[in-house]
Image: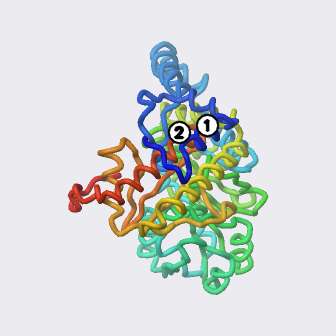
Amino acid sequence: MPNNPLIPRSEAERRDTTDPLAALRSEFVIPDDSLIYLDGNSLGRLSKASLARVEEVVAGEWGNRLIRSWNERWQTLPQVVGDFLGEQFLGAAPGQVVVSDSTSVNLYKLASAALDARPGRNVIISDLHNFPTDRYVLEGLAAARGLELKLVEFDELLGPTADQLRAVVDERTALVSPSQVDYRSAALADLGAVNQVVHEAGALVLWDLCHSVGAVPIELDATGTDLAVGCTYKYLNGGPGSPAFLYVSQSLIEGLRQPIWGWYGQRDQFAMGQGYDPVPSATRFLVGTPQVVGVSLVDAGAHVLAAAGIKPLRDKGVALTEFAIELFDAWLAPLGFTLGSPRDAAVRGNHVSVRHQEAYRICRALIERYDVIPDFRIPDRVRLGMAPATTRFVDVWDAFDAMRRIVEAREYEAVDPTRTDVT
């Protein structure tokens, strides 16, 4: 990439030289060091530890030990890995987190249980622009139960705030279900402040942590969070389609009824008896046989990140996104781009969105002409995810320099605007 005198590439190189987490990148499989991968907020890179764990689980535990591995390791994997995520990334004491199913399924289970726990209340509240699967699950529950789903249009750069929710939550509200980090803008919500407002109205809160877990410190117990779900394939590097997790506050577990009664939530599972008697922990929200390979990969990826520590990861994430905004101001703002993320790092997650009317074609030009992989989000956002474990400052510099040149030379005009690529 050619240098730009306004902010020389040597400045990015200097920041990489002084980066305390620079060595962490070597823990991941990076076959092409020239590829600039800024989509770790959609799918994290593969860790070398995960490759080793696959061999251990498939060849060793399955191939050699066969069914004996159920008693030796597999049976309690969802709880063991859940407790580890709780300790290292979620601020949750043991017995409240399990790894299972997908985010959508877990959201359904916890939302259904929460609605049962608030009889006589008939309103669910969420963000009009919340991630689609969240809205669809809640729409389905509202339709099946004859409830009202109130979708509130929060400010994209603020996310759901306590003040905004105070105006819409009342005695009819059963459940409020927002995302901690807005998937479009990276706006970071205040868990404690929102929880307090919702609790004052007597309702429950169910958070989606998909774009925050592994990127920002989370304190579920300390903030009085009721319920939460999240995926593991983004910043936790669990792999494509890796099992999600769910959190249930210990204070609520005994009073919540799991809507899908499966044998892995049963107290005396192998008695094979009549009648459902759920385990008195978050384990009651397990359903069927766990995805052993998937949960094992979640464990492997999470251990690599935990060794670095969530605070250093957050500090680097802030530094990367601050550098991105510095480059945006110098290079992209004069070309007609607008910033689609908060400027204040305290209320911003680990990605930055830049907006332009030709965002889709700019995104495709980055991928096809410069080996830069961000992603596109409708209608006009190029979203750049900066995973602190693997993203370098030179990656950020090169990506923004490429965007600048694509627009200056109108290179995006060579891209077919009718294509429907995922990224």
Q: How packed is label 1: few (under 14 Cα within 10 Å), some, or many (20 or more)?
A: many
Q: Quadrant of the N terminus?
A: top left
According to the image, label 2 marks what residue? 237
Q: Quadrant of residue 159?
A: bottom right
Q: Secondary structure at mark 2?
A: loop
Residue 188 vs 7, above or below: the answer is below
| Amino acid type, callout 2 | Asn
**Label 1 vs 2, first from the N-terminus:** 2
Residue 115 vs 310, above or below: the answer is below
**In x, y percent, where is residue 53?**
53, 24
Q: Residue furthest top?
A: 64
- Residue 277 can be seen, yes or no: no
**In x, y percent, where is residue 370?**
35, 44
What numbered label is drawn on residue 302? 1
Q: Are marks 1 and 2 in contact (CB under 8 Å)?
A: yes
Residue occupying image coordinates x 61% and y 80%:
173
